[in-house]
Every structure is written in structure tokens, then in C-alpha cells.
Image: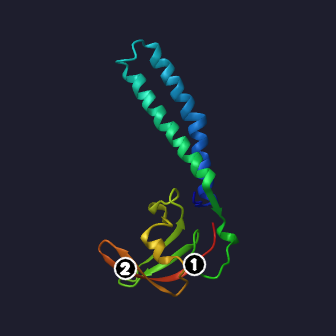
Amino acid sequence: MNNIPVTAFGAKALEAALLKLKDVSRPRIIEDIRIARAHGDLKENAEYHAAKEEQSFVEGRIKEIELKLSRMQIIDVTKLSQDGRCVFGTTITLMNSVDNSEITYQIVGEDEADISLDKISCHSPIASALMGNEEGDKVIVKAPKGDIVYKILSVEYYI
């Protein structure tokens, strides 16, 4: 199996999500099932079936997170060679060559990606185009509306 790259922050977030599922969600659902069973006939007990469905979802999510945690490779960007290259974990400021607008992204793992926080997946088209390039380079990103050319203004190595 392949390792899953993740930042230290992303690893902590996954661990926190797992802890919440195990320590909060699982016991609550068990209690919901116990209460629903007390209502009698389970065949037409909507509360019971809803709780069992939620239990199935939570248990599946727990297994998924545990698998990811067992396969993850934590990458500490501050310990990487700071040679100005775009690599996993770096924060990159780009300039759109058409309108000269600037945007900053951090390249992170799939589970950490959140465009509203300017964190993009290492598997996204823009991250793929950036990887291995360095400050001053121009990159072409394949987008649904056509190619976009960006100039890499800066590459930063911080958490």
C-alpha cells in the first residue's frame, strides 16, 4: 500500500476526528439504540433504524480514518531543503499572467484540502503543475475554461 502524505497539522486533525468518533459519537449512538429498543417492535421503529444506520456510517468512518492513520507519512515542511522548489507542504504565492491577480495556496494532503482556507490537494491540477518548479518559474495549469498561466512569486516553508 502507498503512503498517504499529510502535514503535521493534518495528522492531528485526523487523530482528533477519530477520537471524537470513538469517544463521543459511538457512545451516543449506542445509547440511542438502547433507547430505541426500549420502544418495542424493531420492525417499524424508525428511531432504531436511523440509529443503526448512523452507527454503520460512524463505524465505517472510524475504519477509514484508522487505515489512513496507519498509512500516513507525516511531512514536516520546516525540515525540507528550502531551495525555493514547490513541494508538498509549501505555501506558494502565484500571479495570474492575465490579470496580475495574486493567490496563495498551501499544497496539502487530500484530507486536508480546503479551498476556503487556500489549502489545495497535492493531487489537484494546480498542485501537479506547481510541483518541482521554483520561484520565478511560469507554470501552465489545465483548467476547464482553458489553460491558465501563473508565475511563482514565492515559495515558503512554514507550517
Q: According to the image, label 2 marks what residue?
A: 148
At x 68% / y 77%, what residue is drawn?
81
Residue 3 coordinates in the image, percent (x, y): 59, 60
Quadrant of res 98: bottom left
Q: Nearer the viewer, residue 64 or 115?
A: 64
Q: Nearer the viewer, residue 123 or 135?
A: 123
The crowding category of the residue bearing disc 2, from other C-alpha atoms within 10 Å (few below 14, some 14 to 19, many at least 20), is some
Q: How many marks?
A: 2
At x 60% / y 82%, what residue is drawn?
84
At x 37% / y 79%, what residue is drawn?
148
Q: Amino acid at mark 1?
A: Val
Residue 113 coordinates in the image, percent (x, y): 49, 60
Which residue extends farthest front?
1
The vertical placement of 40 against 120, above or below, is above
Q: According to the image, label 1 marks what residue?
A: 155
Q: Amino acid at mark 2?
A: Ile
Residue 85 coordinates in the image, percent (x, y): 58, 80
At x 44% / y 81%, what residue is drawn?
95
Give the distance between the C-alpha atoms of the residues marked 1 and 2, in whole angstroms: 19 Å
Q: Secondary structure at mark 2?
A: strand
Residue 26: give its label. none
In this picture, residue 20 sits left or right of residue 98: right
Quadrant of the frame with the C terminus = bottom right
Indicate the colouring scheme: rainbow
Q: Secondary structure at mark 1?
A: strand
Quadrant of the frame with the N terminus = bottom right
Residue 5 coordinates in the image, percent (x, y): 58, 62
Which residue extends farthest top?
40
